[in-house]
Amino acid sequence: MKTRLWLILVVLTFPFMLVNPCTNRVHFSLETPINEGIEEARAKFQEAYNATVEAERTGAEVSEAVKKLNDALDYIFQAENHTAHGDMEQAFLWTQVSMQLSEETLVLTQELKQQTETLRYTRLVVYSVIFVALLIFVIYAFFIGRRIWKRHRQNKFMEMRVEGTLGSK
Amino acid sequence: MSTNEMKDEEKAIAVAVLSAIIVLSGLLVYISLTPARQEPFVSLYLLDSEKKAENYPQLLVLGKNNTFLLWVGVENFMGRIEYSSVLVKVDDGTGHVDPSPIDPVYRFEKVLLNKETQEFPITTTINQTGQHRIVFELWLFDELDNVFSYSGSWCSIWLDVIES
């Protein structure tokens, strides 16, 4: 008797458990089922995003990488939509494309970082060379100028002496 | 003091004053040309179907205009790229906001360049009568913790839905 009562209770309670507590709310079509492939694609995307942030921090121009990242994100959303509609094969394909794009972004950010570092190094070397050359030029000009000035003063002095001698005569 | 020495001293003073003027004017030019550092921020805004801040839906009639289009815009002025997520949440207006604790019914994600603005279209259908509030929240990805954190930017729209 007791068991039968329990069974009736469970049978009565079970349908209530299936009812969504938000049934009086607005309904939207989206549900985001997560599967392993999508999680993997998201992890790869985050890795690529972090690499892009790092590349930008070093001073690289990352607009191309951001474009790729946004494409990768769109593909993840496509995969999520296909998963929601039960089309796992298509979802798998979209996650693969997304991961491929994230991988490309990772390679691209590495290249961008290297380019930026090379550019910075080249700039440093060029500026240093220009600075040293200017310094040498200024020092050289100073000594040459001083020599010219001395000669000029000597010439002037000699001219004065000559004028003085002539004047005394 | 001889006249020559006087002349030399005057020359030295003139050179010092001239150098000081040149250095000071250089500094002034530098300060006036350097733009002031901007406070980093992100913002979220809502537009109607014609991308204007005018004709927002307010009263919806079931079966007539209960499907509507809104545009949500996100601006990034954080001085760096940002991975942003806009969460769309719907409640009856009694719940807490900033941020709302309820689960999102929809979300958009985009990586934004610095000083970039993105606008997302949202087509929504409401099938239940009564008062509804649609809340839009902006979350930003924190690459250190690998999680989205709430940016503090949100906006909402109130809707009354009646039967035809």
Image (spheres, coloured by chain):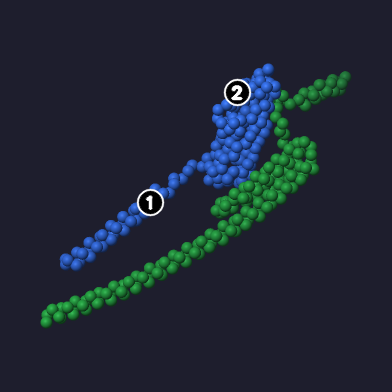
Chain colours: A green, B blue
In the rendering, at what x and y percent does residue B51 appear? Answer: 58, 33
The residue tagged 2 is B58
Name the amino acid, label 2: Gln
**Of B113 and B40, the residue lying toward us:** B113
Q: Residue at x 24, y 77 (%)?
A: A155
In the rendering, at what x and y percent does residue A156 appear? Answer: 23, 75
- Residue ranking furthest to the left: A169
- Residue ranking furthest to the bottom: A169
Q: Residue at x 76, y 45 (%)?
A: A93
In the rendering, at what x and y percent does residue B158 appear? Answer: 60, 24
Q: Which part of the image, by quadrant, shows the C terminus of chain A?
A: bottom left
Number of numbered markers: 2
Write down the quadrant of residue B122 in the picture: top right
Mark 2 secondary-structure assignment: loop
Chain of the residue that carries numbered disc 1 in the rendered image: B
Chain of the residue that carries numbered disc 2 in the rendered image: B
The residue tagged 1 is B29
Task: Check residue A93 in the rendering and tell me which mark sits there, or answer none.
Answer: none
On screen, residue A155 above or below B108 = below
**Of A73 and A54, the residue lying toward us:** A73
Residue B66 relative to residue A143: left or right: right
Name the amino acid, label 1: Val
Q: Residue at x 57, y 26 (%)?
A: B55
Residue B28 relative to residue B63: left or right: left
Q: Which part of the image, by quadrant, shows the N terminus of chain A?
A: top right
- Residue ranking furthest to the top: B164
Q: Residue at x 19, y 76 (%)?
A: A160
On screen, residue B134 above or below A45 = above
